[in-house]
Amino acid sequence: MSKDVWLNANKDTAGDLILTGYHGPLRDMPVYDDVKSLFGHGSTALDFGCGVGRNSVALSDTYDKVISFDLPSMIGLVPEDNKLSNITYTTDWEYVKSFKFDTVLASLVFQHIEDSELNSYLTDLFQIADRLVLHSRTWIDHSASQVLPIVEKYFIIDTIEYSKDPNNPIEDHFIATLNKRAE
């Protein structure tokens, strides 16, 4: 899926783009329990590729402050119900980089980012976070590139579980916790 698809997302297409097969209200999008159980607790979390904020709201239950980053097209679709006082939604990556995070959540986003851009984001994440919770498909859209080999340049796998997408019979998803590599 190209970046243009995400840049042109709207209230009619975003649900299915974010969660294949979902067509309900954006404010009611479910959070995967398997991912939520890995969030942890702390002061500040980053929801990288936050979409319409479904995971941001869940993170706000266990973190004092949540910074939620995504493309303008997605941030513009965040339902009012997902705009809580301890969540800041932003499209400004320079702003995001001004924080230190206890945890970064990247749920169903890395597989949509081309290698060079993903490496750039990971270089920055390596500087601002010690822990990454990653939910992804194993490959990057329309390429032969695998997500984990790119991520493992910056972070070391602590736990990983491969799973099946409920909307796809292929076991091509994983949920992992990763810790920053020693500098």
Image (cartoon, rainbow, N blue to C red):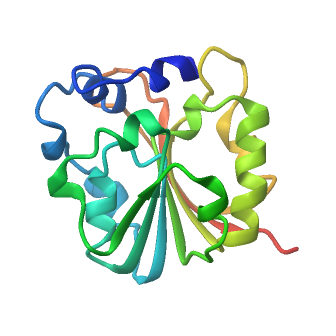
The x, y position of residue 15, in whole percent, is 25, 29
Q: Is residue 93 visible?
A: yes
Q: Please tell me which residue lies in front, 73 or 106.
A: 73
Q: Residue at x 52, y 49 (%)?
A: 91
91 relative to 154 in the view: left or right:
left
139 relative to 120 in the view: left or right:
left
The x, y position of residue 58, in whole percent, is 27, 64
Tell me: residue 99, above or below residue 33.
below
Q: Quadrant of the C terminus?
A: bottom right
Q: How many marks?
A: 0
Q: Residue at x 84, y 74 (%)?
A: 182
Tell me: residue 163, above or below residue 21.
below
Task: Identify the image quadrant of residue 20.
Answer: top left
The x, y position of residue 122, in whole percent, is 72, 53
31 relative to 98 in the view: left or right:
left
The x, y position of residue 31, in whole percent, is 25, 51
Q: Please tell me which residue lies in front, 162 or 35.
A: 35
Q: Is residue 1 visible?
A: no
Task: Identify the image quadrant of residue 99.
Answer: bottom right
